[in-house]
Image (tube, rainbow, N blue to C red):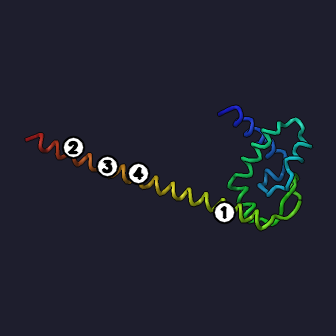
C-alpha cells in the first residue's frame, strides 16, 4: 500500500470513527471540508481531499445521495436539502457502475467459456494424437 493511500485510508477511518455523518454514510453538507478543518486543523488539506473523494465515490455514499432528500453536518444533523441535480448525478454514476460491472462479469464469463472450450479441444486433439500414435 502506497504511503498516500495509507494516510488517506487512515484519515478516512478517523473521520468515520469521529463523525456520525461519515459513520452512517449520510449525504454530507456542502462545505464539510471546512468544518473538518475547523475541528481538525492538523489535517493535511491534500489528504483530506483524497479521503473525501474516496468517501463520496463509495457505493454506499452514492446510494445515499441518489435516494436521499437531506444533507447532514458532521454530527448527523440536517444541514440543507439535496438538489434533484445531485440526486440524478449520483443515480447516473450508480447506473454506470452497475453497467460496467455487468459488462465485466459478462466478459469474464465469456473468457471462462472460451478457455473451457479451448481446453476441451486440446484434450480431444491429445486423445486423437494418442490414438493415431499408438498404431
Q: Secondary structure at mark 1?
A: helix
* Residue wearing tag 2: 126
Dot 2 or dot 1, earlier in sequence: 1
Q: Quadrant of residue 61?
A: bottom right
* Residue wearing tag 3: 118
Q: Secondary structure at mark 4?
A: helix
Q: Secondary structure at mark 3?
A: helix
**Labelled disc at residue 112:** 4
Q: Quadrant of residue 101?
A: bottom right
Callouts 4 and 3 close, C-beta under 8 Å: no
Dot 4 or dot 3, earlier in sequence: 4
Point out the frontmost of discs 2 and 1. 1
Callouts 2 and 3 close, C-beta under 8 Å: no
* Residue wearing tag 1: 92
Dot 3 or dot 1, earlier in sequence: 1
In 3D space, how far apart are the residues under numbered discs 4 and 3 (Cα atoms)?
A: 10 Å
Point out the frontmost of discs 2 and 3. 3
Q: Is residue 94 left or right of residue 28?
A: left
At label 1, counting other C-alpha atoms closer than 10 Å, the crowd grade (few under 14, some 14-19, many 20 or more) is: some
88 to 119, vertically: above or below: below
Q: Is residue 103 left or right of residue 31?
A: left
Q: Is residue 34 left or right of residue 115?
A: right
Amino acid at each position: 500500500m502506497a504511503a498516500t493511500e495509507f494516510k488517506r485510508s487512515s484519515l478516512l477511518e478517523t473521520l468515520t470513527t469521529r463523525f456520525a455523518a461519515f459513520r452512517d454514510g449520510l449525504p454530507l453538507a456542502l462545505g464539510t471540508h471546512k468544518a473538518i478543518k475547523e475541528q481538525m486543523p492538523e489535517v493535511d488539506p491534500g489528504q483530506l481531499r483524497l479521503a473525501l473523494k474516496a468517501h463520496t465515490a463509495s457505493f454506499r455514499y452514492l446510494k445515499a445521495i441518489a435516494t436521499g432528500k437531506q444533507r447532514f453536518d458532521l454530527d448527523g444533523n440536517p444541514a440543507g436539502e439535496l438538489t434533484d441535480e445531485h440526486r440524478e448525478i449520483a443515480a447516473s454514476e450508480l447506473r454506470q457502475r452497475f453497467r460496467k460491472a455487468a459488462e465485466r462479469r459478462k466478459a469474464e464469463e465469456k473468457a471462462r467459456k472460451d478457455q473451457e472450450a479451448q481446453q476441451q479441444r486440446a484434450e480431444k486433439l491429445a486423445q486423437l494424437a494418442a490414438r493415431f500414435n499408438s498404431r
